[in-house]
Image: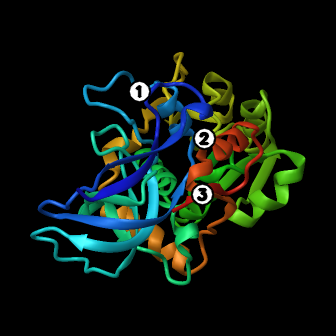
Amino acid sequence: MPTRTVIGVTTFGGPEELAVHEVPLDTPGRSEVRIAVAAAAVNPTDTKFIAGAYGDFDWNPPYVPGMDAAGTIDSVGEGVVGFSVGDRVMAAVAPARPAGGAYTDHLVVPESQVIEVPDGASLDEAATLPMNGITAKVALDALALNPGQVLAVTGAAGQLGRFAIPLAKARGLQVVADARADDVDLVRSFGADTVVERGDRVGESIGVITDGGVDGLLDASVQGMAVVPGLRDRGRIAAVRAFEGEPGRGIDVHRIRVFDHLDDRDALEELRRLAGRGEISLLVADRFDADRAGDAHRRFAQGGVRGRLVLAF
């Protein structure tokens, strides 16, 4: 029986639980494609996944993390019309399924979750884009700001900020972002108009510098109520995790669940186009052979990673 290689866990825990496994090779079904994966990105959701944060599953291990992959299509299912064998593509995938996520040398996904890699991008670079890029686009859609309004982004030096800021600028928004002193130039390079100091008082800093608060805020650093002083009355918050507390002052909180939007082809196409024009920068922080996934997770846990770590298959 043909097999594929996956990097997964049989027991939930830390990076030490990640190991190489051989499982049956999947055949794409109707409207599905199979990708010979060259690179899979390491994301915060992957560390939560292997720790068991998404609950017990009713299928047998190994449980395979990973939400971002890039590679070459090597098989297409019946009814696929947009792709052919040999196409270089990137994909967003939900790992909480029997087939698992992107940490595999062969990945079967619906064609709706696949798009061609951006012009000029390597497969390593392309693997850094889909999941966080979709999150950024969905967050901006939820905030529904108009050209000329002001968006704040916390955690702006991270991957979500890297994509959200240029997407916001492309929509005609003004952007206030936070950064440590050594990340100010990086965040400005994403397109931020104003940069404030990162920290527990970031909301207050944003409120002061904008003379009353911004119209919308993407809380990529998951600071919750600490960001509220940075918003005007009836402003809007996009929260990428659960938001604890009541902001008051008519402020709306929009919970962003990227798992519900992995087939957002409009988002994937917008991201591909902007990255191909160089308006979104794709940065590979480091590259690890797939069998060193545990080392990649340990490096990620140390913090300070700018761009994305990728696993090479």
Circle 2 SS class: loop
User: Which amino acid lies under the numbered mark 3 shown in the image of this protein?
Assistant: Val
**Would you name the residue on which mark 3 appears?**
310
User: Who comes first in sequence, dot 3 or dot 1?
Assistant: 1
- Which of the labelled discs sits on residue 97, or is there none? none
The residue positioned 11% from the left and 62% from the top of the image is 30
Screen quadrant of the N terminus:
bottom left
User: Which amino acid lies under the numbered mark 1 shown in the image of this protein?
Assistant: Tyr
Percent of width and height locating residue 58: 25, 25
Q: What's the distance in space between the residues labelled 1 and 2, CA to CA?
A: 20 Å
User: Who comes first in sequence, dot 2 or dot 3?
Assistant: 2
Q: What's the distance in space between the residues labelled 2 and 3, CA to CA?
A: 21 Å
Circle 1 SS class: loop
The residue positioned 71% from the left and 32% from the top of the image is 203
The residue positioned 10% from the left and 69% from the top of the image is 78
- For this rendering, which residue is in front, 248 or 94? 94
